[in-house]
Image: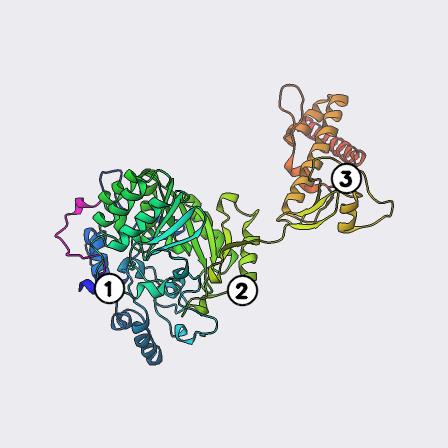
């Protein structure tokens, strides 16, 4: 493989021993048969015979990455028209897919979400020059020195390399990743970026990006991390990387993990887009980074056909939380050249956030953002939870559709109108405090609890008044006495068969009737026993 293809990753595959990957018995990569929800380890049939110690070596993975249309056609089915389109695209945008990530593709599904992210598609040729741009975010216009973007007051982004382990088909920086050649040596541009940060004490947060900074050689990555960590006014260094997703084997290297750990200020911004990317290998390296002292956040991009459903995003966010990776941003797909077929409506993004908020932990709900054109930066979007407002109150909506009158200043105000009104208007005037939708699971539970409490109180009265063996037997059968002082517990069975609005008198009559039937049954049983 030529250095032009390898970029910074100049690899010569050594004769690795099996024990050269991982540091101890408790810190070894998962094997190919491992399993951890929501995804699992697998291999494409083309690589089934590769020894495990080679498969676990990132250098082997890079050396055997899929880089040509010819290789693709040997591994996946394409029509002749698709092959012709792919050949044209190869000149427009680089192709590289490590065997590990390629193995996650279902070869029988042309719409497989892993395939859509990594394999070129003829749809990339159908873009419009009016709606798609090479630099839609105007990063280059906010670049005071080459490679550095300074858009926000207290933070900046530095592009450290143009190389990625896998070239995503929706990448915002396609214009940069088309550059070829090696970047092993520290350039004058690299030094200028560091000097710019040193001269600007208002910068507290530096995003180290690319390409992918974890494709850098150890000496060059060390240059960036040590120089930035030594700047007193820089408190946070964020490494933006897809390596845990597309080539986790790179992080099996303990020298790389130790380098990241020594910098101390490091936060990792991962980029999982689909739950099937959360394999045992990926989760393993996330935990290695956590043990190295790094906080992990995830950037996902909303992509049509990949993750544009509530079910997929719930599974992804829950899987990330299990791996202790916080879902941080959900980006609306940028209008970058060749990625128009991935873009959804903004309404789809709002629908997904609506399906996450309240349904999973708040830790698992990312902020949905549009990275605005012309350098507008990240603008958060969310469903509307403020329904209406007056001088005295605001009307808020929760995830169930419940509408609540809320007094912002903490003071309860009397009804503001003698006119009888309904709905939201009644909430605003103080005639009502809440509008509750019927039939929600929480309300059904509330009704069941209320009925159980009323039944418990009535049974207590029956037991206190009767104190008969039959009453005690009835209470024991219903699981209501605690066996010592006749106190009452809730009974889910009784509650489930009782109307939520049943009165205490009705409950008493029903339980008294049941007690009477129980006494008759016991009396009949004694007669039959005597007769025998």
- Residue 188 sits in which quadrant? bottom left
Magenta residue check for 359: no
Mark sitting earlier along the chain (1/3): 1
Q: Is mark 3 on a helix, strand or loop?
A: loop
Q: How far apart are marks 1 and 3 (CA)?
A: 68 Å
Answer left or right for 402 relative to 107: right
Residue holding disc 2: 345
Residue holding disc 1: 46
What is the chief secondary structure element of the magenta stretch?
A: loop
Residue sitting at x 73%, y 21%: 467
Answer left or right for 11 relative to 511: left
Residue 485 appears at what percent x and percent y? Answer: 66, 19
Residue holding disc 3: 502
Question: Which circle, 3 or 2, is nearer the viewer?
Answer: 2
Magenta residue check for 9: yes
Read off the magenta span: 7-21
* Dot 2 crowding, Cα within 10 Å, few <14, some 14–19, many 20+: few
Question: Which circle, 1 or 3, is nearer the viewer?
Answer: 1
Number of numbered markers: 3
Answer left or right for 467 relative to 326: right
Quarter in which the C terminus is drawn: top right
Q: Distance between the residues labelled 3 and 2?
A: 48 Å
Quarter in which the N terminus is drawn: bottom left
Asked if 347 appears above or below 194 in the picture, the reply is: below
């Amino acid at each position: 493989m030529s250095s032009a293809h390898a970029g910074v990753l100049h690899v010569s595959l050594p004769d690795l021993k099996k024990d050269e990957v991982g540091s101890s018995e408790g810190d070894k990569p998962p094997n190919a048969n491992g399993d951890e929800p929501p995804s699992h380890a697998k291999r494409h049939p083309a690589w089934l015979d590769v020894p495990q110690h080679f498969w676990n070596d990132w250098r082997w993975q890079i050396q055997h990455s899929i880089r040509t249309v010819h290789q693709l056609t040997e591994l996946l089915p394409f029509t002749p028209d698709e092959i012709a389109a792919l050949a044209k695209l190869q000149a427009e945008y680089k192709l590289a897919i490590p065997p590990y990530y390629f193995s996650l593709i279902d070869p029988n599904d042309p719409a497989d979400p892993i395939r859509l992210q990594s394999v070129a598609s003829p749809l990339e040729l159908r873009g419009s020059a009016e709606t798609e741009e090479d630099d839609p975010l105007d990063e280059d216009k906010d670049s005071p020195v080459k490679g550095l973007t300074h858009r926000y007051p207290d933070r900046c982004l530095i592009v450290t390399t143009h190389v990625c382990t896998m070239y995503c088909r929706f990448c915002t920086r396609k214009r940069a990743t088309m550059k070829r050649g090696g970047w092993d040596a520290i350039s004058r541009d690299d030094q200028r970026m560091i000097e710019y940060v040193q001269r600007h004490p208002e910068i507290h947060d530096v995003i180290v990006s690319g390409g992918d900074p974890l494709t850098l050689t150890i000496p060059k990555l060390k240059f960036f991390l040590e120089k930035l960590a030594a700047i007193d006014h820089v408190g946070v260094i964020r490494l933006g990387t897809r390596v845990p997703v597309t080539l986790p084997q790179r992080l099996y290297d303990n020298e790389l993990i130790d380098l990241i750990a020594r910098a101390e200020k490091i936060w990792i911004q991962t980029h999982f887009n689909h739950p099937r990317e959360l394999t045992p290998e990926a989760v393993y390296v996330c935990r290695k980074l956590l043990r190295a002292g790094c906080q992990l956040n995830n950037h996902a991009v909303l992509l049509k056909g990949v993750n544009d459903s509530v079910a997929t995003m719930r599974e992804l966010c829950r899987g990330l939380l299990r791996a202790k990776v916080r879902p941080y941003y959900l980006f609306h797909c940028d209008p970058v050249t060749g990625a128009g077929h991935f873009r959804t409506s903004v309404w789809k993004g709002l629908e997904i956030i609506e399906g996450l908020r309240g349904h999973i932990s708040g830790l698992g709900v990312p902020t949905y953002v549009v990275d605005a054109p012309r350098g507008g930066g990240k603008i958060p979007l969310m469903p509307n939870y403020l329904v209406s407002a007056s001088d005295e109150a605001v009307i808020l909506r929760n995830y169930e559709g419940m509408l609540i009158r809320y007094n912002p200043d903490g003071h309860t105000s009397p009804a503001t109108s003698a006119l009888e009104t309904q709905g939201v208007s009644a909430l605003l005037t103080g005639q009502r405090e809440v509008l509750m939708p019927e039939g929600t699971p929480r309300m059904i539970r509330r009704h069941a609890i209320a009925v159980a409490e009323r039944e418990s109180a009535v049974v207590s009265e029956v037991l206190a008044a009767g104190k008969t063996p039959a009453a005690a037997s009835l209470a024991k059968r219903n699981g209501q006495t605690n066996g010592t002082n006749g106190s009452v517990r809730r009974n889910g069975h009784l509650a489930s068969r009782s109307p939520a609005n049943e009165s205490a008198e009705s409950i008493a009559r029903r339980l008294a009737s049941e007690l009477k039937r129980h006494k008759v049954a016991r009396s009949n049983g004694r007669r039959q026993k005597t007769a025998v």
